[in-house]
Image (cartoon, rainbow, N blue to C red):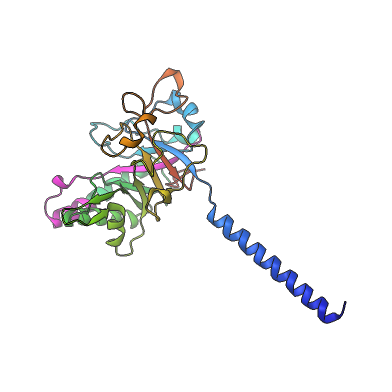
């Protein structure tokens, strides 16, 4: 073989290897591991953590009273959960529209609640850079007062040693004028470039598989919100108007129960999928 032919063959081989490696790197970047987690308003009990961790990589963790509750049973349990191997979804229960008043008052409440969230996360021992999710329960297009509250809260948390996230709807909501809106997209479009981690809920079937523990959990982007970091695909109890198509996957009472709950205790849970085993980065080790 001539020197020129040898050089050409070598160049072709190197080009092939470069293309091959580039394809492999691209594929590995696209195929990210996905992890299953749960959340619920009441702490599941120390005796159930081992069995729950056989299925779930991370757990929700409330910093204040969950919706409709008069107390927070998660307080002081961070160490127990981390010792059992769990990562975290750290939650702060936000305010409903009826509580906000004017835009100015809503912004002040957002600042005050951000301080409360930061203080609570510190008391619970969460490390710097932990993501705290504001629970935005009401869906659809956010009103000016809701936006003032939410973005003041986000700014307050992001100015601290923690990071801000938002839990909100990823379901398409129809408006009176015939338009449709997804709350997560509405928040992002109006966030002004703010750094926000998105945890979306969409328990409509499809895209949700219903109350199932998939062997290969779906990616958060399968929720329909491409930028979602976490997807809550099942809620307990089942919302009949949303998850009617997968009613058979739920228990007769409408709840979704965790498998292998210890002591024979039935634990109703919400199911989540994320690309991290610790979506809030709340572990200390």
Residue 174 visible: yes
Determine whether 231 is above or below 187 in the image: above
Q: Which quarter of the figure has residue 123?
A: top left
Q: Residue at x 49, y 32 (%)?
A: 53
Q: Nearer the viewer, residue 115 or 107?
A: 107
Q: Residue at x 24, y 55 (%)?
A: 180
Determine whether 107 is above or below 232 in the image: below
- The question of residue 108 being in magenta is answered with yes
Q: Which quarter of the figure has residue 22?
A: bottom right
Determine whether 186 is above or below 239 in the image: below
Residue 145 left/right relative to 47: left
Residue 155 visible: no
Magenta span = 84-110
Q: Nearer the viewer, residue 247 or 23?
A: 247
Residue 263, position as x, y percentages in the image: 44, 18
Q: Nearer the viewer, residue 260 or 44?
A: 260
Residue 231, position as x, y percentages in the image: 39, 45
Residue 246, position as x, y percentages in the image: 36, 35
Query: Residue furthest toward the right?
Result: 1
Q: Residue at x 58, y 55 (%)?
A: 28
Q: Residue at x 47, y 35 (%)?
A: 56
Quarter of the figure with the N terminus:
bottom right
- The question of residue 99 being in magenta is answered with yes
Q: Which quarter of the figure has residue 78?
A: top left
Query: Residue furthest toward the top?
Result: 264
């Amino acid at each position: 073989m001539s020197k020129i032919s040898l050089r050409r063959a070598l160049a072709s081989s190197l080009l092939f290897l470069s293309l091959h490696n580039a394809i492999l790197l691209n594929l590995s970047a696209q195929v990210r591991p996905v992890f299953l987690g749960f959340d619920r308003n009441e702490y599941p009990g120390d005796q159930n953590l081992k069995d729950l961790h056989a299925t779930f990589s991370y757990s929700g963790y409330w910093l204040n009273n969950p919706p409709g509750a008069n107390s927070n049973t998660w307080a002081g349990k961070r160490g127990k959960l981390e010792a059992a191997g769990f990562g975290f979804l750290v939650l702060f229960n936000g305010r409903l529209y009826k509580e906000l008043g004017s835009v100015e008052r809503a912004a002040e409440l957002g600042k005050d609640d951000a301080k409360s969230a930061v203080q609570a996360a510190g008391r619970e021992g969460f490390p710097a850079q932990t993501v705290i999710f504001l629970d935005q329960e009401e869906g659809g297009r956010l009103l000016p007062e809701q936006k003032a509250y939410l973005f003041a809260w986000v700014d307050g948390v992001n100015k601290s040693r923690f990071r801000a996230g938002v839990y909100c709807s990823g379901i398409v909501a129809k408006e009176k004028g015939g338009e449709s809106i997804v709350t997560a997209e509405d928040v992002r479009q109006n966030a002004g470039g703010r750094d926000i981690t998105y945890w979306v809920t969409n328990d409509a079937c499809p895209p949700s598989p219903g109350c199932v523990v998939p062997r290969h959990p779906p990616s958060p982007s399968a929720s329909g919100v491409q930028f979602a970091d976490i997807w809550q695909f099942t809620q307990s109890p089942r919302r009949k108007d949303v998850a009617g198509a997968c009613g058979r996957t739920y228990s007769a009472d409408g709840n979704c129960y965790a498998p292998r709950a210890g002591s024979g205790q039935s634990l109703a849970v919400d199911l989540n999928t994320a690309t991290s085993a610790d979506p809030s980065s709340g572990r200390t080790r």
